[in-house]
Amino acid sequence: MAVKEKNAAQKISSTTAKGRGAVSIRNVTKIYDPEGVNVMAVDNCSLEIAAGEVCMIVGPSGCGKTTLLNVIAGFHSLTSGEIYLDDELLCGPDKPLAEQGADRMVVFQNGALFPWKSLLDNVAYGPMVQGILSKSDALDKARDMLDEAGLLDVADKFPGEVSSGMARRAEIVRALINDPKVLLLDEPYRAMDALTKSIMHEALLEMYDRTKVTIFFITHDLEEAIFLGDRAVVMTTRPAEVKKIVSVKIPRPRDYKLLSSEQFRLLVEEAKEAVHEEAIKAFEAGERELA
Amino acid sequence: MSDQAISSDRTSNSGVAPKGLGLAWYRLKKNLVTPAPYMMVFGIVLWLGTYYLLTEGWKVPRFEKIPGPVEVITEFFSYDPIWGTSLFTEDFHENVYVSCRRILIAFTLATGLGVPLGLFMGWSRKFKDYAFPILETLRPIPILAWVPLAIIMFSGFETPILFLATLASFFVTTLNTMLGVESIDESYFRAAGCLGSKKHHVFWHVVVPGAMPFIFTGLQISIGVAWFSLVAAEMISGDYGLGYMIMDSYMVNKYVSMVMAMISLGFVGWGTSAMVRWSGNQMMQWRVKALALEGR
């Protein structure tokens, strides 16, 4: 009895003291049946993400990482299992499709800033349509946040006019203006060259240190995973479940000198071994990647 | 020459992008050093030359009855035309005006009906299931096949013609708009959902602007189709208009006036297409700018 109470108290303190945005994924399974043949994308996957954690999800292409993200975001329904956000049920057996909402903001693989709106209008869009801020207040706040991210000079440009790095940064600002509990990033820096990537990483870490928002970050770049994350969760090939969790106990703030340290290299090695096995399995299975 | 070009580029590259007239002048200068304008002139000369030789020069059999370029141009700009119609006579103005008015009405109607219908069909699966099969069955019926029905259904000269021109461009606009909505990347809908959009926000902020490029491609085709069916309708049942002018001139052997009406149609049609293109570019600056950076 006493133990139970203590556990409950701990649970509460863990969400309140560290902030918000704890994601609890419990025995989640997702089966697609596009043409009558069942394809299991995620199999009985469980994962606890603490509030304010940077959780990196690593795995071979098409292993079902994005499926998991889509279920959390409310783009796909789950087949069985439950997902909680701060002890509130997002989706479960009675409610397979989570409601989409601004508490879980997604940054997409190929970028999804509206190309027909300027960066400023893109950023101001969320608070405006939710009715939280009036149009002029939303624009003011958007301008301030773009300024913070060093994007004020290009605020009035369209996404098609700025570099992919700037667009991606603006997209993160567009997510953050809604004050989300969790930021869901789906390989956001996939198509970028190494130099741009390193700048993006530093910007993301700087943003994280400021906001301490929970981050769910999908990637197959192991160095990225170790450099950014508190934990790197290696997924198995389809159907996805957790294969190995690499804890990254490197203090923050981190900078690029870290990349050449022994500790960093060892962690990357550790993750690489686990991923490599899965990559071989995925390659031999030769299945087409799921979206 | 090339040294000069480089140095002048450097001076114009002083940091401020030219605008308005400056930009137009810059583009003209840049264009004149490419072969494009000279090719264009050469193409026109070649075409006109062939036309002249076939009709007025060598008088090739079967071509000798066709009015040549010299005859047509002289007549066109004559204050006292031999066949009674030129750029300065009232009946010509009347015909051009009537055709343009009909196109304006038909195109406005077709756009006003076709764009919303296409948007809803692309947006709502259910609505598409209702409307699309009927549309797809009616669409392949050639516009000329509608002529008798149009004459039975509507009275007078004006309404059947308007109906035919509207119908043709309506189908094109609707279909293109629907395809435009379907072409919008799913991630924009998802992003809108994440950002807390309600249904009407998605419609106005994603569906409408996202379909815009296809809509305007459709409108350019649709105005062409409107002219096509208008002229067909005017030739069959008309009192005024350029199509009527062609048929009427042919009946009374005024071949020069006939060719004049054809050329006028070419220029007026080109003008209306350009207007549609221009307004599309005005409404889609985001696209114009992005394409410009890709060098298009």
Image: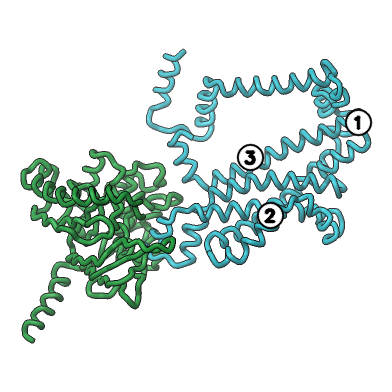
Chain colours: A green, B cyan
Which residue occupies 35% across, 72% down?
A: A96
Q: Mark 3 sits on what residue?
A: B274
Nearer the N terminus, badge 1 or badge 3?
Answer: 1
Question: Numbered disc 3: what chain?
Answer: B
Which residue occupies 81% across, 55% down?
A: B160
Question: Numbered disc 1: what chain?
Answer: B
Nearer the N terminus, badge 2 or badge 1?
Answer: 1
Residue B56 place in picture, x, y as percent: 83, 19
Which sits in the foreground, B234 or A123?
B234
Q: Residue A218's quadrant in the figure?
A: bottom left
Q: Residue B58's quadrant in the figure?
A: top right
Q: Mark 2 sits on what residue?
A: B139
In this rendering, the answer to whether A91 lies above or below A168 is below
Q: Is residue B121 left or right of residue A4?
A: right
Tell me the tag on residue B83: 1
Q: In this view, does A205 lie to the left or right of B171?
A: left
Q: Is mark 1 on a helix, strand or loop?
A: loop
